[in-house]
C-alpha cells in the first residue's frame, strides 16, 4: 500500500458505508487497536543529527527497517531515541521517502554509498521516482562498467518459444542477432548498390562504332542490363514479400515509410513490363527510369545516420518551410525589381520576370554563374543588394536546422546506450512484483488471520505471540476493509494462479467434502458458505465470542488432488462448551497450518473433535509438524 | 507555348517533373488521410503537454475551532485527518482524478474508479467539482460519528445518484456494478456477468415494501433497521478513528 495514502485509510474504511446496506452477509470483526496510543514523535539520531517524525509516518512501509520492529534493535534506552551509525546526508532522502512516498536520488551522492544505505534500510532502489531514475541508472551503469572487465553481454538470448515468423522479423530488424541475418543484410545491401551502379553505368557512353555517335552502354548491352535489373528486382521483391510475411502487424508494416520505399523501388520495373513502348506515354517511361534511383533510399535501413538525417529534416520542417517561404518572397521581389531595372537595356537577358527568377536564385545563393548579368547601373545596384540579402536570408534558419540535427543525433545515441526497453521492462517487472506482494499479503494473511482471531478469544497470549504474524495495525485494517468487500459481494479474492486453475476446472462442480456433518455439500461454494454462515449465526451460549466467529470453516478438496485450498474454514460444532471450543480451534487451526504446508489430504474436523479427549499429546504432535 | 519549350526533351522533362509532383502530393494526401504513415524511426520524440494544474489554487480550511463545533471530532482527530489530507493534496482541495487515484490504492486488484466517482459525488455537497477539507470532514463526521439514522441517510444519499429522493433499479445497478468491479477478475467463485443484477433484485426484494419499483428514504431506513446484519455492520464505524 502506498505511503501517502496510509493516512486516508480511515476515509476508505468510512467509504465502506456504501457496501453495508447492500451486503447480505455479516461483516467481519474490525481489528481493534490493542493499545490505542496517540500518535507520537520519535527521534532518529543518525550519527549525531537528530531527525524527528511521527511514528505513523514510519509505519507506512512495514517491510523496511524503520517501519518494522527491526528498528527496536537500535533503540537507545538512556536517551530514548533510535541511534543509527550511518550517513546523515543520505538519511535525509530516505526519511523523505517515508514522508512523501517518493524516493529521490541526490546527484552529488556517490552511487555505491547510496545503494548501501538503501540496502541497510531495506528499501529497494527500483522505487526511485521517475524524476531521478534516469540519473540513477546512468551512474549505476558507469559504475558497473568500471568494475567489470568485459562489457555486458550484448547478445540477445534467443527466447525459447519464438515462432519462425518472430525469428525472421527479429532477424530483419536487428541484423546482428544471427549470422543468417547478417548475411541477408549484406546481400541486400550489395544488391542495392549493384542496382544503383547499374542505373548509373547505363548512361555512360561506351565505345562505339566510329561512324555512329556515341551510344550509352544501356542501349548497347540492352540484354545484359535488363538481366541485371531483373535480378535486382527479383531480390527486392522476395525481400519485400518476406518482410511482409514476417511482420507482426502487416497492416502497420504496409503503411510504414520503408515499405513504401520498397514498393516504389520495384514498381517501375513491373509497370515497364506491362506497358508497351508507346509514343504517347514515353514521357512517363522516362519518369519510371527516374524512379529507379529511389532504390538508393533503401540504404536507409542499413544506415542509422541516414535515418536520422531524414528525421531531422522532417522535424525541422517548420524551419525549412520558413526558409523556403522567405526565399520565395525575396526572389519574387528582386526578380521584379531586376526585370524593370533591366528592361530598358538592349539585348538584356532579363526577358521576363520568370526569366529573372533564375538570376535571383543564383545570386542569392551566392552561386553566380554569370550567364545573366545586369548591365544598367540601377540593375547593378539592385543586384548587389540582392546578393547581400541572400546571404542573410539563408544564413538565418540554417543554424536552427543544424542544432536540431545535433540534438536528435545525440538523443539517438543515448537511446541506444540506454537500451531503454530492456531496462524499463525489468524495472517495471520488479515494481510489479512488490505490488503484487502487497495484494498477496492480503490473501496470505487471510489464511492466517482466521485462526488469529480464534486465538484472540481464547486469551492465550503465548500462543498468540508464537503463531500470529506481526502485521501492523494499518495492514490489518486494510485487510479488514478488503474482507468487508468480499463479504458484500459474496466472492473472494484469489491470486492469479489459483484463478486460472479454478477457471480450467469450471466444469468440475463437484467438491466432495469429507466432513459428514456438512450434509448438502455439492455445488458452488458461494451459496454453500452463505448458507453455512447463516446457519451458525445463533450465538453460542457459553462462548464469549461474537456471532461472527462461528461460521469459520469447512474444507474443500478438489478431485484431482489440487493441494492449494481456496479458503480454509474451520467448522466448529455448536454444542461444545467454551473450553472444548478453545481446544478445537487451536487444534483445527494447527491442522490447517499443516494442511497448507504439507500436501496431504486434509483431516476433517469431526475426526479431530473425536480425538479431543487425548488432546494434549495430539496438540504437541501437531504443533511440531505445523511449526 | 514554344517560347519556353525548345524541343521534345523539354516537354518530356516537364512531364517527368509533373508526374513526380503528382506522386509526391498523392503520398502526402494519403499520409494526411492516415492511409500510410510517413513518420520515420525517431518516434521516441515526445510531446510535452502542459497540464494546467490547479496548483495556484490554494484553499485554506476554516479554523479548527469552527470545525470542531460543526463536526463531532476532537482536535487531535482533526489534526490527524488534516495532516493526511494536506499531504496528499497540497493545494487544499481534491479533484476527482486525485480522489480516484487515492481510492484505487486500496484496491489493487479491481477497478474502483466508478465507486470512487459516486463517493466523490456524495462528498462534494456543493457540487463544485472539488472536495475541500470541510466537505471531507463533514462527510466523515456523519459516517463515523453520526447516529444510525444519519449514517443511513448518508448511504441513501450515496445510492440516489440523481438526488431525487428515491433509488431506482438502474441507479442501484450502477452502484452494484461499481462495487463488483472493485473485486477485479481474480475471484473465487468466478464472477458471473449477472451477479450484480441478481444482487440488485434481492436488495429490492428486501427493501421495496410497497413493490413500486423504487426505494424511498423511509422504506430504506425502515428495512435497514429491521435487518440485524446491517445494524451490526453500522457499529463497525464507531472506532475507525
Image (cartoon, rainbow, N blue to C red):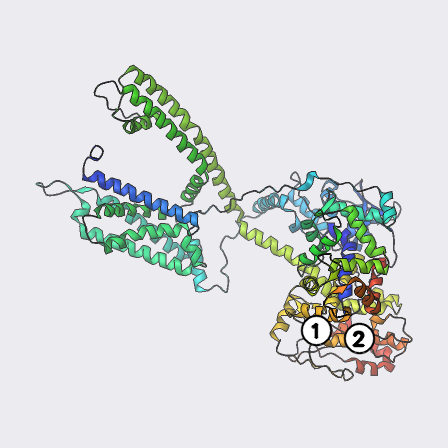
Q: Residue at x 78, y 40 (%)?
A: B60
Q: Residue A14's quadrant in the figure?
A: bottom right
Mark sitting on residue B228? none
Q: Position of residue B93 (x, y in %)?
A: 73, 45
Q: Which element type, helix, strand or loop, lies under badge 1?
A: loop
Q: Chain of mark 2?
A: A
Q: Is residue A436 above or below residue A94?
A: below
**Residue marked by disc 2:** A534
Task: Report the front residue among A522 and A89.
Answer: A522
1 and 2 marks on the same chain: yes
Task: Report the front residue among A187 and A457.
Answer: A457
Q: Which residue ends up furthest to the right in the rendered image?
A: A542
Q: Position of residue A148 (x, y in %)?
A: 56, 48
Residues at marks 1 and 2, CA–CA distance in whole angstroms? 22 Å
Q: Position of residue A599 (x, y in %)?
A: 69, 75
**Residue marked by disc 1:** A565
Q: Chain of mark 1?
A: A
In the rendered structure, the answer to whether residue A353 lies left or right of residue A522 reads left
Q: Residue at x 49, y 38 (%)?
A: A407
Residue B24 in sight from this viewpoint: yes
Q: Position of residue A83 (x, y in %)?
A: 81, 46
The answer to which of marks 1 and 2 sits earlier in the sequence is: 2
Q: Residue B227's quadrant in the figure?
A: bottom right
Amino acid at each position: 500500500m502506498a505511503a501517502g495514502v496510509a493516512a486516508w485509510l480511515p476515509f476508505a474504511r468510512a467509504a465502506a458505508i456504501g457496501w453495508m446496506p447492500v451486503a447480505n452477509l455479516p461483516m467481519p470483526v474490525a481489528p481493534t487497536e490493542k493499545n490505542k496510543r496517540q500518535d507520537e514523535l520519535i527521534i532518529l539520531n543518525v550519527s549525531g543529527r537528530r531527525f524527528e517524525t511521527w511514528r505513523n509516518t514510519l509505519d507506512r512501509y512495514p517491510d523496511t527497517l524503520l517501519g518494522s520492529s527491526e528498528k527496536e534493535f537500535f533503540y537507545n534506552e538512556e536517551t530514548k531515541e533510535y541511534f543509527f551509525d550511518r550517513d546523515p546526508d543520505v538519511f535525509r532522502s530516505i526519511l523523505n521517502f517515508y514522508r512523501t512516498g517518493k524516493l529521490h536520488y541526490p546527484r552529488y551522492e556517490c552511487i555505491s554509498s547510496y545503494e548501501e544505505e538503501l540496502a541497510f534500510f531495506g528499501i529497494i532502489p527500483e522505487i526511485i521516482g521517475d524524476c531521478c531514475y534516469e540519473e540513477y541508472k546512468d551512474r549505476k551503469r558507469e559504475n558497473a562498467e568500471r568494475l567489470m572487465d568485459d562489457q555486458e553481454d550484448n547478445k540477445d538470448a534467443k527466447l525459447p518459444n519464438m515462432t519462425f515468423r518472430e525469428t525472421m522479423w527479429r532477424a530483419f530488424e536487428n541484423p546482428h542477432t544471427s549470422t543468417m541475418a547478417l548475411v541477408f543484410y549484406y546481400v541486400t545491401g550489395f544488391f542495392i548498390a549493384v542496382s544503383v551502379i547499374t542505373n548509373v553505368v547505363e548512361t555512360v557512353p561506351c565505345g562505339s562504332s566510329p561512324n555512329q555517335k556515341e551510344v550509352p552502354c544501356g542501349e548497347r548491352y540492352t540484354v545484359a542490363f535488363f538481366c541485371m535489373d531483373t535480378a535486382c528486382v527479383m531480390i527486392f521483391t522476395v525481400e519485400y514479400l518476406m518482410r511482409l510475411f514476417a511482420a507482426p502487424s502487416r497492416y502497420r508494416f504496409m503503411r510504414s515509410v520503408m515499405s513504401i520505399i520498397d514498393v516504389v523501388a520495384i514498381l517501375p520495373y513491373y509497370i515497364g513490363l506491362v506497358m508497351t513502348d508507346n509514343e504517347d506515354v514515353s514521357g512517363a517511361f522516362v519518369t519510371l527510369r527516374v524512379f529507379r534511383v529511389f532504390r538508393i533510399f533503401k540504404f536507409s535501413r542499413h544506415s542509422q545516420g541516414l535515418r536520422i538525417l531524414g528525421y531531422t529534416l522532417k522535424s525541422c520542417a517548420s524551419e525549412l518551410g520558413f526558409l523556403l517561404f522567405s526565399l520565395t518572397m525575396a526572389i519574387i521581389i528582386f526578380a521584379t525589381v531586376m526585370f524593370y531595372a533591366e528592361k530598358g537595356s538592349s539585348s538584356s537577358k532579363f526577358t521576363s520576370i520568370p526569366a529573372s527568377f533564375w538570376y535571383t536564385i543564383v545570386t542569392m545563393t551566392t552561386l553566380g554563374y554569370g550567364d545573366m548579368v545586369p548591365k544598367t547601373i540601377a540593375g547593378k545596384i539592385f543586384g548587389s543588394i540582392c546578393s547581400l540579402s541572400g546571404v542573410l536570408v539563408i544564413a538565418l534558419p540554417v543554424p536552427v536546422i543544424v542544432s536540431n540535427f545535433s540534438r536528435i543525433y545525440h538523443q539517438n545515441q543515448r537511446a541506444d546506450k540506454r537500451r531503454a526497453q530492456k531496462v524499463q521492462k525489468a524495472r517495471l517487472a520488479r515494481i510489479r512484483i512488490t505490488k503484487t506482494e502487497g495484494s498477496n499479503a492480503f490473501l496470505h494473511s487471510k489464511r492466517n488471520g482466521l485462526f488469529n482471531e480464534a486465538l484472540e478469544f481464547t486469551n492465550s497470549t503465548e500462543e498468540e505471540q508464537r503463531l500470529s504474524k506481526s502485521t501492523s495495525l494499518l495492514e490489518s485494517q486494510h485487510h479488514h476493509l478488503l474482507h468487508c468487500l468480499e463479504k458484500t459481494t459474496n466472492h473472494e479474492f484469489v491470486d492469479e494462479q489459483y484463478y486460472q486453475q479454478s477457471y480450467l476446472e469450471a466444469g468440475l462442480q463437484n467438491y466432495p467434502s469429507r466432513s459428514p456433518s456438512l450434509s448438502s455439500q455439492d455445488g458452488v461454494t458461494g451459496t454453500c458458505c452463505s448458507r453455512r454462515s447463516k446457519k451458525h449465526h445463533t450465538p453460542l451460549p457459553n462462548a464469549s465470542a461474537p456471532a461472527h466467529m462461528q461460521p469459520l470453516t469447512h474444507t474443500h478438496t478438489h478431485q484431482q488432488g489440487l493441494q492449494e485450498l481456496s479458503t480454509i474454514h474451520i467448522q466448529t460444532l455448536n454444542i461444545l462448551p467454551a473450553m472444548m471450543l478453545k481446544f478445537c480451534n487451536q487444534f483445527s487451526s494447527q491442522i490447517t497450518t499443516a494442511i497448507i504446508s504439507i500436501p496431504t489430504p486434509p483431516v476433517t474436523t469431526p475426526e479431530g473433535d473425536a480425538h479431543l479427549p487425548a488432546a494434549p499429546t495430539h496438540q504437541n504432535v501437531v504443533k511440531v509438524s505445523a511449526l | 507555348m514554344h517560347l519556353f519549350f525548345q524541343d521534345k526533351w523539354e516537354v518530356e522533362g516537364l512531364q517527368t517533373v509533373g508526374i513526380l509532383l503528382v506522386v509526391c502530393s498523392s503520398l502526402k494526401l494519403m499520409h494526411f488521410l492516415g492511409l500510410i504513415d510517413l513518420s520515420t524511426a525517431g518516434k521516441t520524440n515526445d510531446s510535452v503537454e502542459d497540464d494546467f494544474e490547479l496548483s495556484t489554487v490554494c484553499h485554506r480550511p476554516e479554523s479548527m475551532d469552527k470545525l470542531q463545533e460543526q463536526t463531532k471530532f476532537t482536535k487531535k482527530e482533526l489534526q490527524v485527518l488534516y495532516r493526511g489530507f494536506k499531504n496528499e493534496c497540497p493545494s487544499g482541495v481534491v479533484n476527482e482524478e486525485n480522489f480516484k487515484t487515492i481510492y484505487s490504492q486500496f484496491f489493487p486488484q479491481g477497478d474502483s474508479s466508478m465507486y470512487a466517482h459516486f463517493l466523490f459525488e456524495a462528498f462534494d455537497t456543493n457540487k463544485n467539482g472539488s472536495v475541500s477539507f470541510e466537505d471531507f470532514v463533514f462527510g466523515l463526521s456523519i459516517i463515523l460519528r453520526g447516529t444510525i439514522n444519519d449514517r443511513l441517510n448518508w448511504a441513501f444519499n450515496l445510492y440516489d445518484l440523481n438526488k431525487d429522493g428515491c433509488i431506482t433499479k438502474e441507479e442501484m445497478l450502477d452502484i452494484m456494478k461499481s462495487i463488483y468491479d472493485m473485486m477485479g477478475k481474480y475471484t473465487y467463485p468466478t464472477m458471473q456477468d449477472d451477479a450484480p443484477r441478481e444482487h440488485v433484485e434481492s436488495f429490492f426484494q428486501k427493501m421495496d415494501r410497497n413493490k413500486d419499483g423504487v426505494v424511498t428514504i423511509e422504506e430504506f431506513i425502515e428495512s435497514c433497521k429491521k435487518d440485524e446484519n446491517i445494524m451490526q455492520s453500522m457499529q463497525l464505524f464507531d472506532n475507525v478513528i
